[in-house]
Amino acid sequence: MSALPVFAQTGAPANAAPATSAQRPADNPLFVESTLDLQYPHFDRIQDAHFAPAFDAGMAENLREIEAIASNSEAPTFDNTIIALERSGELLSRARVIFGSLNGTDTNDTRRKIDAEYAPKFAAHRDAIMLNPQLFARIDTLYKNVGDLGLDAEGQRLVERYHTMFVRAGANLTEAQKQEMRRINAESAKLGTTFSQNVLNEVNDSAVVVDTLEELDGLTDAQIAAAAAEAKTRGVEGKYVITLLNTTGQPVLPQVNNRALRERIHTASVNRGSRGNQYDNTQVIADILKLRAERANLMGYPNQATFILEDSTAGTVEAVNGMLGQLAPAAVANAKLEAAELQAMIDREQAAKGEPTFQLEPWDWAYYSEKVRQDKYSFDDAQIKPYFEMKNVLENGVFFAATQFYGITFKERTDLPKYHPDTWTYDVFNEDGSQLAIFIFDPYARASKRGGAWMNSYVSQSELDGTLTVTANHQNIPKPQAGQPTLLTWDEVTTMFHEFGHSLHGMFSDVKYPFFSGTSVPRDFVEFPSQVNEMWADWPTILANYAKHYQTGAAMPSELIERVQAAAKFNQGFATTEYLGAAMLDQYLHQLPADQLPSGAEVMATEAAALQAAGLDYAPVPPRYRTPYFSHINGGYAAGYYAYIWSEVLDANTVQWIEQNGGLTRANGDRLRSTLLSQGGSKDAKQLFVDFTGAEPQIEPLLIKRGLAPDPTDASN
Ligand SMILES: [Zn+2]
């Protein structure tokens, strides 16, 4: 049974022997297990027309399997029920995992149509399984006798997790309630697809058209050429088009000297999804929230957040509110100190120009914070970017760190088919030379790709299936003009380390059952291993290995490195505040009872009220995502966006442990791999943390890392 595809999660495809049924068209590669290494998908043979037949046949086959398990005349056993479920749905999982990834990374009209058509069908299919009373009765019997089944700890946990999954999907409801659940799930699925399609359409539709070259003052020649090329593509040749990313902040803002253009870019960004056009998402999200609250009520919970958090490591709404509430005042206070510095810079500059000063606005923040950063730490992005050529960062930074810490090695291969030309494929080997995984790197932004950065797995490791991992990382790095190098910002560098941390979690998986493979862990735990991997980005020996000038090969000057490291805590008040704004907003919307939810027309006012209630209504720092383009709360992170900071507590403790125990050593890498990364979801998540660090998590290391508390090891403080 595969999990639904979400941001960092992988489906867990169960696969049996290749089928030979006559109804499987020989020309559809989705119908059979790929014969390529590690079942790497046959991207060269897969066509969009193959998906619908594979989905239809996959669902029909899966229902036959379920029927056979549910109506088995033998008494339920671990093998004839749980293992049989683990092996079921092979064709459907394979087709969905491949489609889900291709639709996210390179969508088109056909794929969008398939997505819209099948989202409600998949929801109904899942309900047909989860709400099957005969099937649940067998799982329930096993669950009640789990101690007598002669299972090891992983097997016992599998029975318990299946039971929880069915109960939380509504298996204990009355038939009338189940009918209501089916309706809610079908409508939610439909609306979820509409929401994400609107988000992508709005990103593309809100790109800013600039008439004159003068307005682009501050951009590099390469950026201007890209903006001119984009204008040509969009049929406005002679003008310039600045494309947007899906965050509130836009990466070009630090460079734009023209204040009016900064305001236009920012305004275009924050208005996405609430402009009253055909892609407006306010009514869509209002309807989604209502359905979620109804589902929570049906399940006996006061609201969606309470329902979701019960099955997280945080456990309760109170725990999450307490944690976020503890951070908010300190973060905003920090942001206000930063704002004072920015305002002083504005006042100074305006006075020098003999012009009246103005008040800091949200579209000024990135621009002036870049200036203050240059002033304080004497470097700017343009100075450091030449040292961060993309493929060099990947191979001599990200891969090198994994080799140093875990002993694994990498070799690029070019014989495997690609779904898009801008992707790179690598074999990954264990220290003894045996194959560990295959890794796909897909870095560039494109109009057909959804926003953000994420990891997915095409194939997930399990002993039961005899599979290893095929995993991919995706980013939204602007693609330079042909012949130009891809030079990264520090943020893009650390994101690359982050996403690869997710992939390591997938690759190192060493579990028996597909259900527990790799990143199949609670949402508020899954970001933890990826955040830990970020620690190597500026680790001195790692940085020295990859921070080299793309033209001269010269090492990054050590004083520049020191300045980059010193600047790491710079602007953390802003970063924490914009994150907390979004995290609080997510909680607020999902903690409202059904009768207090906003209508479509009230969504934006409710957003303002939520930020005010949390003390995060600080105008110069809007939330990282506003409600109509907050993709996380539409996808797997509903009532779960807090997971990043929750995971960061574990991350900060773990980084501290590694630093205090020898740092970048093979012994530490082996310890992290064996106690934690290899375990997937096969043990309680918090226990995995304790197994590695030997202690309960503390909040102080996070406060220090975020600059919200003084660093006791820092002599200057
Ligand atoms: Zn992540």
Image: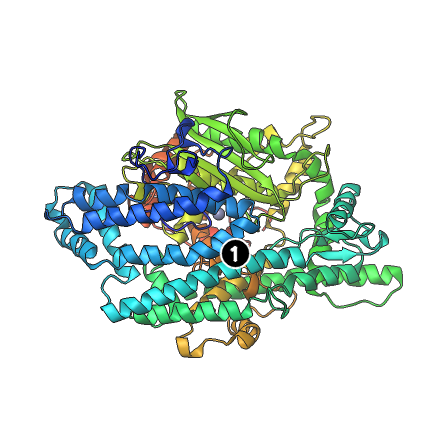
Q: Residues within 10 Å of mark 1 (few under 14, many from 20)?
A: few
- Looking at the picture, how far across and down is residue 589, in whole percent? 46, 69
The single residue placed furthest to the top in the displayed view is: 433
Describe the element under mark 1 as helix, strand or loop: loop
| Quarter of the view holding residue 220 | top right
Can residue 661 be seen at all in this image of the molecule? no
Q: Is residue 494 left or right of residue 164?
A: right
Mark 1: amino acid: Ala
Q: Residue at x 83, y 62 (%)?
A: 350
Q: Is residue 340 above or below residue 161?
A: below
- Looking at the picture, how far across and down is residue 281, in whole percent? 55, 66
Which residue is disc 1 drawn over?
A: 709
- Looking at the picture, how far across and down is residue 261, in whole percent? 77, 59
| Quarter of the view holding residue 355 | bottom right
The single residue placed furthest to the bottom in the displayed view is: 595
Q: Residue at x 51, y 54 (%)?
A: 113
Can residue 674 be seen at all in this image of the molecule? yes
Q: Is residue 312 above or below residue 667?
A: below
Of 657 and 518, the residue lying toward us: 518
